[in-house]
Image: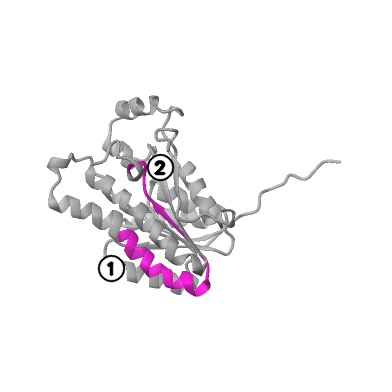
Amino acid sequence: MKREKQYPMKRLVRRVAFVTGAGNGMGKAIALRMAREGADVAVNDLDARTLGRVAAAVERCGVRSLAVAGNVADPGDVDRMTRRICKHFGRIDILVNNAGILYPTRLMDISDDEWRRVMDVNVNGVFLVTSRVLPSMTRHRWGRIINMSSIAGRSVSTIGGAHYTASKAAVLGFTRAVAKEMGRFGITANALCPGMIDTAMTRRTISNPQLERYCRAYPIARAGTPDEVARLAVFLASNDAAYITGAALDINGGDLML
């Protein structure tokens, strides 16, 4: 007798996810992977047109989507976006703080303005969005917070400046503090620490020959893909990771082993 093909159950059915910086790269991959796992997904980015295309792609996965353009470093924008998501979906279960910026500027050339800009998006943005989402999670006694740090936060950035390294290290400290305080509400908080991932931001920062040279030195001698990061994010958002909190999960092809 022919056996029926077994399909894995979707892990995020009836969950609502909010992914910042979802216009491209890892954020887009995470939004789409969560949609394929059954979550309704609100997507954020600065570029409304790009965001509209991502939201349409999310809906083609058979779930609901909502595009909320705005700046995660602007408290007014964050208030507006989170209110709109909660009104539209009724709750926020999963937050992925992915929005971030990177400059390769060397330390002695970093201006005060550029330092503040990186900290505003990469650190203050994570705080602002998290603080506005927590009331929904605490009310429903369940939540998953996934913060995008970097191999830079665990060591030092290969291609980014000191401000990028400092911001990603701050994200790790913030993640641990959230995990410690919010666990009693059924909320976990973890960080992802990608290494060299093949995204538009990476390719804007370094040339193709530089990228290939870096990757040849890794035990897994290639750049990672956004979808590989997305699969790890889905795991952290699911009940499979219910006893993991305050962790920093590396995904770097062996570039850094701790």
Please determine whether, in this image, residue 86 is positioned above or below residue 107.
below
Tell which of 30 and 122 is nearer to you: 122
| Residue 129 is covered by the magenta coloring | yes
Residue 19: image x %, image y %?
Answer: 42, 57
Q: Main secondary structure of the magenta part?
A: helix
Quarter in which the N terminus is drawn: top right
What span is colored magenta in the figure?
Answer: 125-152
Relative placement, left or right, of 231 versus 131 is: right
Which of disc 2 and disc 1 is earlier in sequence? 1
Query: Residue at point 46% right, 53% down?
Result: 31
- Residue bearing mark 1: 75
- Residue 174 figure quarter: bottom left
Query: Residue at point 60% right, 55% down?
Result: 11
- Residue bearing mark 2: 194
Res 50 visible: no
Tell which of 97 and 108 is nearer to you: 108
User: How crowded is the residue under tag 1: few (<14 C-alpha within 10 Å), some, or many (20+)?
Assistant: some
Relative placement, left or right, of 4 versus 257 is: right
Relative placement, left or right, of 119 versus 89 is: left
